[in-house]
C-alpha cells in the first residue's frame, strides 16, 4: 500500500524510458469479475498496451490479463479490448491531443483505489535514440554526484 491510498498492481517501467510523458490522467477500467480477481493477484501485462479514442470512447488494446486460475467456463479472454471510464471533457481533450503528430496514449500503471481498478494513462510522445542516450548519461552523472556527496 502506498502513501497515496492505493495499491499499485502493475507498472509499465519502460514507458518513461521510451516516451516523453506530457500529461497523465486517471481512468477507471470496465472489467469482468475474473479479470478483477486476476489483477488483484498481479497477473497482468501492460508493456505493449496502448489506448485509442474510438467512437467517443477510450479503449485500451493489448492489455493482457491472465485467466483466473480458479475461474471456470466464465473465465475472460486475456487480450480483449477494455473500455476506460473518463469524463466527456477528458475524452475530447485526449482526442485532440492524439490527433497531433507523434502523440499516443500509454498506460503507466494499474492500481486499486477504494476497491476500484484504475489506470494511470499518459499522453506521450515517442523518444528518439539520442534522447534515450541523453537520459542515460544524465542518470549516470546524477549517480556519480550522489556517490561523491556520500563519500564526503
Image: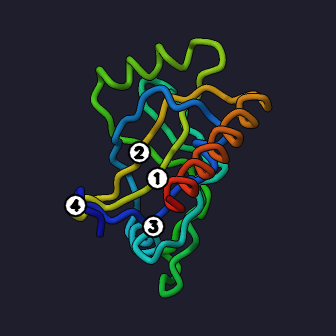
Q: Secondary structure at mark 2?
A: strand
Asked if residue 145 lies left or right of residue 135, the reply is: left
Q: CA distance from mark 3 to mark 2?
A: 18 Å
Residue that lies at the very extreme toward the bottom in this rendered image: 70
Q: CA distance from mark 4 to mark 2?
A: 14 Å
Marks 2 and 1 in Cβ contact (< 8 Å): yes
Q: Which mark is residue 109?
A: 1
Relative vertical location of residue 88 with respect to residue 71 in this rendering, above or below = above
Disc nearest the viewer among 3 and 4: 4
Say whether disc 2 or disc 1 marks the residue closer to the N-terminus.
Answer: 1
Marks 4 and 2 in Cβ contact (< 8 Å): no
At 50% from the left edge and 53% from the top edge, which residue is drawn? 149
The image shows residue 4 at horizontal and vertical percentages of 24, 56
Say whether disc 1 or disc 4 marks the residue closer to the N-terminus.
Answer: 4
Q: Which residue position is annotated with label 4?
A: 5
Disc 1 packing (10 Å; few <14; some 14–19; many ≥20): many
Along the viewing direction, whichever of 131 and 43 lies nearer the viewer: 131
Relative vertical location of residue 82 with respect to residue 101 in this rendering, above or below = below
Q: CA distance from mark 2 to mark 1?
A: 5 Å
At 69% from the left edge and 29% from the top edge, which residue is drawn? 127
Disc 3 packing (10 Å; few <14; some 14–19; many ≥20): many
Amino acid at each position: 500500500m502506498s502513501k497515496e491510498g492505493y495499491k499499485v498492481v502493475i507498472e509499465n517501467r519502460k514507458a518513461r524510458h521510451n516516451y516523453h510523458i506530457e500529461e497523465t490522467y486517471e481512468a477507471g477500467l470496465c472489467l469482468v469479475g475474473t479479470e478483477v480477481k486476476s489483477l488483484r493477484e498481479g497477473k497482468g501485462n501492460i508493456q505493449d498496451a496502448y489506448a485509442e479514442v474510438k467512437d467517443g470512447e477510450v479503449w485500451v488494446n493489448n492489455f493482457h490479463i491472465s485467466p483466473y486460475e480458479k475461474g471456470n467456463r466464465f473465465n475472460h479472454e486475456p487480450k480483449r479490448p477494455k473500455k476506460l471510464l473518463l469524463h466527456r471533457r477528458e475524452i475530447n481533450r485526449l482526442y485532440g491531443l492524439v490527433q497531433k503528430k507523434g502523440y499516443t496514449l500509454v498506460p503507466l500503471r494499474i492500481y486499486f483505489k477504494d476497491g476500484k481498478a484504475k489506470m494511470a494513462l499518459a499522453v506521450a510522445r515517442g523518444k528518439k535514440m539520442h534522447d534515450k542516450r541523453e537520459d542515460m548519461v544524465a542518470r549516470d552523472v546524477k549517480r556519480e554526484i550522489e556517490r561523491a556527496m556520500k563519500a564526503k
